[in-house]
Amino acid sequence: MEAPKYPIHHHRKHRPSGNTCALSLSLSKNPRYRAAANAGEMAGALARPRNASDDRINELPEVLLSDILSRLGTAEAARTVVLSTRLRDAWLASPLRLDDLELPVPARGKVPSIEPWTARADVVTRALDSHPGPVALFRLSRTSFRGRVPAAEAWFRQLAAKRAREVSLCFSPEWCHDALADPLLGCPTLRVLALGKCHLSDAGASAAAAAALTELTLSETCISEAALQSVLSGCPALRSLVLKHVHGLQRIRVSSCRSLILLGVWHYKQLDEITVEDAPCLERLLGNMRLNAAITVTGAPKLTAFGYAVVSIPHLFHGERAPQGVNKGLRAPIHSVKILAINVKFSSKKDMEKVMSLLESFPCLETLHFQSSDYRSGADKDYTTVSDYIQKRYPIRAHVLQFMRIQSEMCDVPKWVTEQQNLLSQSNMASLEAEVVFEGMKQRKDFTIEGVNALADPFDGGINILGH
């Protein structure tokens, strides 16, 4: 490996740690470092005659040390700042990045009275208490509150006061115990917020003033319909909104969100209505939208991707009504949608009839994804053929449809796939140049906003949208 342009020497009595070596390499590659060296600032510090008492790292400008520390992960930064007082001062002057996946915690056997998740929460508290802010990143994915709601709510107040930019609570939802997260809604510097099983009050939502917020994810979070409207009004820059199994909503109404590009809705209990109005930038409506809810979309001329539309309801929850009609909410065709994904039981002729009716509401499809909700063990006998329905009932526009994917466990059965291909060859699809792909069920990657935004077709990248 080529030596760094400005190597940092150490006296033999002070063996350099791995962190110090990493810091040296980072310096040699850092643009600010090179610019400062070219200006003479770095060269003067590093070109002096070597002396046993020299501490070259501590001679670097504070702004450069802060910049380097801000680029390190949580664990690396924590190990680096103990090297000197100046490094600790530089850490305090740089934005805090706290990711609990990188936090060292005691093993179970070493601290019998403190479980690892509790010890990790104590580390989080100490880090927030000791750093003045701002907070560039606060991400928890394995830290448990375990009934310590006051401590969690204190974190939220500190994060708001310390000008947090990204806050993500993506751990197991039962760990959060409905901590009140209202202070975060009033943080003007917040850009990304993901809450797992927290609580947002009407009063807190009415005071929402997160003008810089572009991504909001609420998972297993309690919020009223009025509070949701207040949050949306207080976040005018919102580009992505994800609502996953949110409690307290019978109707989801997204209105006048003029910057919104992605809307995700996942629900498992009774939801009467999903309404989108005046969303001129909306391009994608994703989730597991069960068709016993009225789905209405108006004022969204850029909406091109829709799904999964869940036609077959696997089971109903207590008090939930079975869907009465597939087009309950699709009162008019949505001409802008080019990509549609549908989840349905191929073995149910009744549900397949609903699919054919549903397709009439999307007359300009270019890409169509079918995913079967059947299990192969119960589907081998009298298995309805999706290709047969397409052949006989769906008037496909030959100049529009370009690609169709049929995903099912039955696609692992060569005989079944051959039957489908023969039916399609006999249908009016024979004149199409559309590509038809039969695909078995496969393991999929976890859903992320960044992941789907990187795809031209959100259903074509192996991302688990339906089961998110």
Image (cartoon, rainbow, N blue to C red):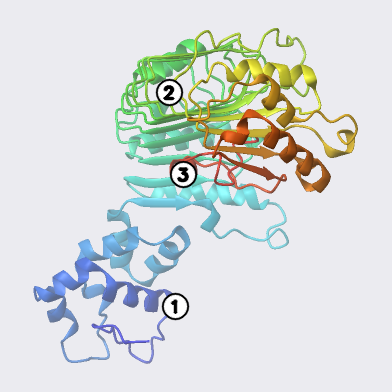
- How many badges with numbers are in the image? 3
Mark 3: few/some/many CA within 10 Å (<14, 14-19, 20+): few
The residue that mark 1 highlights is 18
Q: Earlier in the sequence, mark 1 or mark 3?
A: 1
Which is closer to the viewer, label 1 or label 2? 2
Gap between marks 3 and 2 measured at Cα: 18 Å
Res. 322 visible in picture: yes
Instruction: Give the quarter of the figure containing the C terminus.
Output: top right
The residue that mark 3 highlights is 455
Gap between marks 1 and 2 measured at Cα: 55 Å
Task: Please state which amino acid type lies under the numbered disc 1.
Answer: Gly
Q: Helix, strand, or loop for circle 1?
A: helix
Q: Residue at x 21, y 74 (%)?
A: 59
Image spot of residue 174 (x, y percent): 66, 34
The residue that mark 2 highlights is 336
56 or 210, which is in the foreground? 210
Image spot of residue 145 (x, y percent): 60, 39
Mark 1: few/some/many CA within 10 Å (<14, 14-19, 20+): few
Q: Above or below — where is 144 with respect to 384? A: below
Q: Which residue is at the far left?
A: 39
Gap between marks 1 and 3 measured at Cα: 38 Å
Q: Which residue is drawn at 77% across and 43% down?
A: 418
Which is closer to the viewer, label 3 or label 2? 2
Q: Which residue is drawn at 65% across and 35% down?
A: 467
Q: Helix, strand, or loop for circle 3?
A: loop
Q: Which residue is at the far right?
A: 381
Instruction: Give the quarter of the figure containing the N terminus.
Output: bottom left
- Left or right position of 47 against 285: left
- Left or right position of 47 against 194: left
Mark 2: few/some/many CA within 10 Å (<14, 14-19, 20+): some
